[in-house]
Image: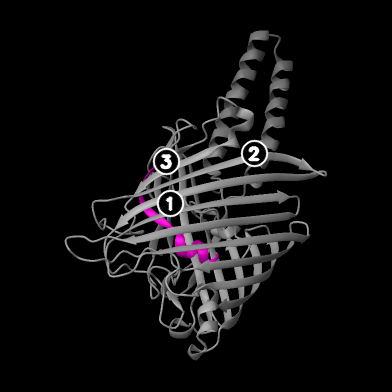
Amino acid sequence: MPNKKWLLVPINVLVPMMLLAVQVRGAETSSESKRIEELERAVADLKQEVARLKKENVSAPEGKMKTKVTYDGKTYVEKAVVEEEKLPVYVRQSGSELKLVLGGYVQINFEDGDVSAFEGRFGQTALKDRFRLRRARINLTGDFAEQFDFKVEGDFENSDGLNSSRTAFEATDIFVNWHQFAEANVKAGQWKAPFGLEQLTPDPSLIIIERSLPTGAITPERQIGVQLWGKPLTNIWPGEKDLLTYYAGIFNGNGRNTTNNDNNNFMYVGRLESIPFKGKIVGQDSSLKLGADVLNSRDDAGTNISQSLNLLVNADGSLSPFVLPGADERTAWSVDAWFNLGPFDLIGEYLQEKVNGRTVNGMPPGFADFTTNGYYITAAYFLIPKKLQLAVRWEDLNPGQKGNDGIRSITGGLNYYIHGDDLKLMVNYIHTWSDFRQANPEFGQDQFNEVIGRMQLMF
């Protein structure tokens, strides 16, 4: 290929020579018109020469170059070619979403000692020391221009909840929410029924690694249904819009990821929340949040009424999921409070549930009526602001099915926030007492100890 600079050399020589020729010719004639004609002819010749040189001088293609080696059977030939630019890989929504967000989180536990004894897992339901993939979730959330938002979330984790041997990916939250009016949102799909402060607290935001036994035994966890909820003071009193929030839902009542209702009845759940105070106390940001819940459901035989943990008292005082042997009607309620003062949090909740058997088509319920109640109190303090947090929890559950069948636990823990809840390390020590085993020593030990460590990553 000709060198571009070398080809332009004739132009540098030709231009002065032609101008000199024009001057000489101008000197030999006195005719002004001839001088102009000669000058125009010279310019035309110059344009023709430049055009010719441009055609001969083929410029190298623009772009990043790479060496391509070819082989013709005898010799290798290297040739510089333009490297093709690879287009970026991206995902684009097929709908008209204004916002589409992909996220998720992973929680990995190490559990040693009397594993999950605070959940009633000892004796015949005891578990072994283990590493545990507690949660591994991925979710997609979005907003539409038509005032709709949605969430689709699934979990890869192995759980001791609805199915202790579950290893497959399954749905957690799948719902669509219409938010045209802040006072009256309409939500449909599958999510946590609005019952219980600790149950409704997002998993990555928990102060203690695992939720308390009273929460797991009584709250309904995720259900399929429809819900009306909102903040009625949003437009009437904008400055105090969080003073009142309500939730009212109708659900199948027999758990998540089910295709059929257990009968023609539904579970009715309601919750009220209020933040009566949000301001400063002794120069510290402070707030007080109050809540109350109510639930009613009529269930048929085969329904698990302890969706996320254990409630049925076994012969040795341990607990397992309560799967109804016959029909029932259950009514539950709870009250809760969360007080925050700068680096200090104090959280408490009391829950109660009455389970009454029903005779259906001449079939007795197969169990005696009982009332379950329990509570927990959690306190936490940041030793290093937003980094190192000390936490403690006392909890007590009375299953109400046998004499002295209560289970009590105290938990102490440290949380290290490397990057907020996005990346944190947690460690808990738990000591548990079994009242039933203390009263019946023939079943073995009545006190248990466990250590749990957790690493959490959100993305």
Q: Inspect this view and state whether residue 149 appears.
A: yes
Q: Which residue is mark 1?
A: 193
Q: Residue furthest right?
A: 282
Residue 118 in percent (x, y) is at 55, 74
Relative side of 124 to 340, left or right: left
Work out whether residue 345 or residue 110 is closer to the camera in this orientation and state it. Answer: 345
Q: Which of marks 3 and 2 precedes in the sequence?
A: 3
Work out whether residue 87 or residue 421 is closer to the camera in this orientation and state it. Answer: 421
Where 28 sits versus 362, above or below?
above
Residue 276: give its label.
2
Q: Are marks 1 and 2 in contact (CB under 8 Å)?
A: no
Front label number (3 vs 1): 1
Query: Start and end of the magenta stretch?
Result: 212-227
Disc 3 is placed on an element classified as strand
The kind of residue tagged 2 is: Pro
Using the rendered view, name the quadrant where residue 263 is placed. bottom left
Spatial distance from mark 1 to mark 2, Cα to Cα?
24 Å
The kind of residue tagged 3 is: Asn
Q: Residue at x 23, y 51 (%)?
A: 264
Residue 328 in percent (x, y) is at 31, 60
Q: Residue furthest left?
A: 361
Residue 60: give its label.
none
Front label number (1 vs 2): 2
Spatial distance from mark 2 to mark 3, Cα to Cα?
27 Å
Residue 220 in percent (x, y) is at 42, 57
Q: Which residue is mark 3?
A: 177
Q: Are marks 3 and 1 in contact (CB under 8 Å)?
A: no
Where 314 sits versus 5, above or below?
below
Disc 1 is placed on an element classified as loop
Disc 2 is placed on an element classified as strand
Q: Inspect this view and state whether residue 68 appears.
A: no
Q: Residue at x 51, y 75 (%)?
A: 132
